[in-house]
Image (cartoon, rainbow, N blue to C red):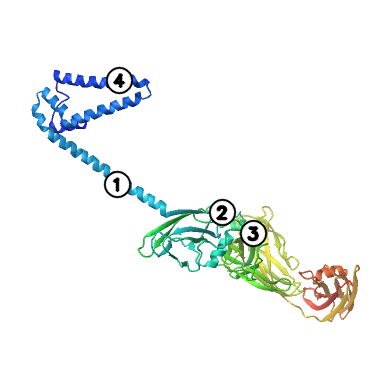
Amino acid sequence: SGGVLAATVLGGAQIENTPPRQATTDLAAATETGIAARRAAARADARDERGVLKEQEARKLSRQQRLREIREGKPLARVAAAHGLEAEVAHAPRLEFAESEVRAKLLADIDAARRRAKRAAVLEKLRSGISGRKVIRPSYGELCFFEHEFKSPADRDCVFEVRCDDPDISLVASTAEWRALRAASGLPAVAPGMEDDALAGNRLFLLAGESLKVPFKFQSFDAELAKDSDSSDIKRGAPDEGLHLRSRAVAVHFVNADDGTSASVLHVDIRPRAMTVARTFRFQTAENEFFKERLPPPPGVATRDASGRGCLAVRASDPAVAATVVTTESEEDGEVDEVALRYKCGEGSVAFYVCVYADSFLGKLAAVWRVFVHATPKVDVSSLVGQSSHASVVVQGGVATRRVAAFCSHPDELQVSPDRLTLPPGALTELQLAFRPLIPGRLDVAVHLVDLEKGELVHSRLVATDARGPVVSKTFDVDAAPGARAHKKITYTNPYARPRTFHLRCTHPLLLHFRPDRLDLPAGGSRPMGLTFEPAEDWERATRGAGGVRGGPAEVLVFINDEDDATEECFRIRVDADPR
């Protein structure tokens, strides 16, 4: 036991090594006999239901008896006298003092451990009482609205500051925005305790013990592309991996403005979702120029609220892209809202995302668009309507020989020759462009060279055309008959003193046919040219506007060109296609 061990260490008694005497043996035998008798009696009662309890009580009584004897020093004195060590009995007070000192040390250690555990337990209990947790799963550009009920723990009127280190989490300070976001989230527009002066910036004014639902919103445009994405994916048209937000945990503290203590903590776990792209747009523009485009809003999205005010809003992922909502006047629909994009292009291609919202607070994400802008080298070509203008471009081959074909976005006005060619590696190849416009105005025509074996885009060129209207020398009127073709003859005279050949062309080759389409005239000679007009039904369909309303008589320009495809003379023919 502890007392015998202390006596052995401090008193120097060698009890284990001293030969026992007869008195000691009798005392030990008597003690053991009594203990054995009690244990035997307890085991005899084990058959009874209380036998086990009696045995445990006998063991406890035995241990108490030993401890009492050790504290009183009786066993130690008897053992020392039996071995002739009467002098060691004088050390008993010292041994008892050492034992009490050890016991006090152990009790002090236990008390200190209890105090440390108590402090941690109390702090954990307090933290669990003043802290809350909220889990949100936003996607790129999506606004997540949530509320946290905060109760003032003070017994007086206090001002609390809401502090958060994450700029994407903010308080909804405007009552109108608060109501709109609650309605967009499917909650009642008015919350208990909602007041116009409850929030002032990041401060809360609460009475003693007052509680309030504090509104928060999370919206992030700080994202990055997928790790396995590559810039060459833009050219290859790879699947859209989208933008990804960062997963993080944010702590929002409610701090008492008087003493600076934290009254409550809200832990917000941000677990982003993948974004969903509704549409993909691809545009071509010239290098080092401004890209400007207007797109209609997503189908089924209301652009006006109940009071008639515009509620459409847009946001672009690239800060270099200006995305706005513009209103245009339309004769059929009145005021029409469109999404306007503007971007200063450099060299190469760029891709960005446009988030379209159905409310002015950016709370309802209606659609996400992916926009590609391919900046290509530009060639300027100008010509008169009905007259051909020629230009050439040079294309450099790649690392391997390729068999390519040339395709044009407006083949009726721009022709590329040759349309099939081979690009040697590293060599320069010249392409001829012939531009013959049909209507006046500016037009950007895209020319693509596509690999015939792999179907890949090898080269791209943008041809900026400018068509000017010709000088009309004569005007004729023709009535188109319903269900039958109309015919008309016009006589043309060669004004030159030598034979010339003239080619006949028009702006509506599918509705007007020439017979013949070429005039071989001697010097000063004349010859009639026959014109055949399609039935009135075809002309009526051609003259109808975008809304299906007839736009009046159709105008056709007839060009008389020389051998170099230069316009010698131009006639205007007005075709009345009214079937009545």
Q: Name the residue under label 3.
A: 279
**Mark on residue 115?**
1
**Residue projecting furthest to the left:** 87
Mark 2 or mark 1, whichever is nearer to me: 1
Binning the other alpha carbons within 10 Å of mark 4 as few (below 14), some (14 to 19) or many (20 upward) gives some
The amino acid pointed to by label 2 is Ala
The amino acid pointed to by label 1 is Arg
Q: Where is residue 32 in the image (x, y as percent from the top left)?
A: 23, 21
Q: Name the residue under label 2.
A: 274
Do the CB atoms of the residues marked 2 and 1 lie less than 8 Å apart? no
> Label 1, label 3: how many angstroms apart (C-alpha)?
64 Å
Mark with earlier residue (4, 3): 4
> Label 4, label 1: how many angstroms apart (C-alpha)?
44 Å
Residue 235, located in which quarter of the rendered image?
bottom right
The amino acid pointed to by label 3 is Arg
Left or right: residue 496 compared with residue 321: right
